[in-house]
Image (tube, grey):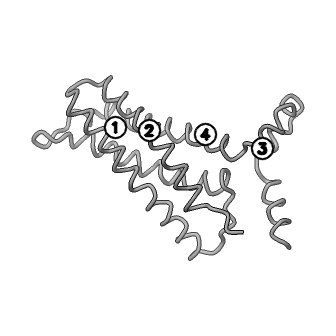
Amino acid sequence: MSPKATDEVYMEKDIFDKIMSLPGLRVFEDFYQKHREGLLYLFFGGVTTLLNLCLSALFWYVLKWESWYLGSFAIGTFLGNLISIIICMVFAYVTNRHYVFRSQVRGTKEITIEFLKFVSGRVATLIIEIGGVQLTVILFPGDSVALFIGKLITQILVILINFIVSKLIVFRDKS
């Protein structure tokens, strides 16, 4: 089977393509196909951000990790943020690989290399996100609303940087 035929079969399985071909949504299908990658990245970036914020809220506010300090270091905030980021990193890899960039990489070794590139690209934004949240804790100690807003602001920056890294390095089309 030629690469083009493989792409067409792979594309056929995409639920978003099927949704866009529904009678009421066909009017948007050309726009969707033209901007598919960016739209799906925004969609899954939004879902990942929502998941990240919900997990952080769970750790910080429901489980009360926000109040854990090691001296003046907000260890609970740090741990909740780190665990949220790691869970979301795996979720983002799976959705970016399958839906957004439609990676054609196959084989355990190749997928492992792709995943390690993805994780490596996320390390810089992990540092930005953790740093942004810790900066918020320093600037607005004890302010839960400011903490959540700081987390949200860092998420926007992280989404933009992650798209560039994913598009240009991790999932770039080698053909």
Check disc 2 and report the residue beneath it. 155
Q: Image quadrant for the N terminus?
A: bottom right
Does 63 appear above or below 164? above
Which of the marked residues, 1 or 2, is nearer the chain's N terminus?
A: 1
Q: Nearer the viewer, residue 107 or 132?
A: 132
Label 4: which secondary element: helix
Under mark 3, the amino acid is Lys
Q: Are marks 2 and 4 in contact (CB under 8 Å)?
A: no
Q: Earlier in the sequence, mark 3 or mark 2?
A: 3
Mark 3 or 4 closer to N-term? 3
**Which residue is denoted by mark 1 in the rendering?**
59
- Residue 6, percent from left and from top: 81, 66
Indicate which disc, 4 or 1, sits on the residue closer to the N terminus.
4
Q: Which residue is mark 4?
A: 42
Where residue 83 sits: x, y (%)? Answer: 37, 48
What residue is drawn where x is 52% and y is 55%? 165
Residue marked by disc 3 = 34
Q: CA distance from mark 1 to mark 2?
A: 17 Å
At label 4, the amino acid type is Leu
Mark in the foreground, 1 or 3: 3
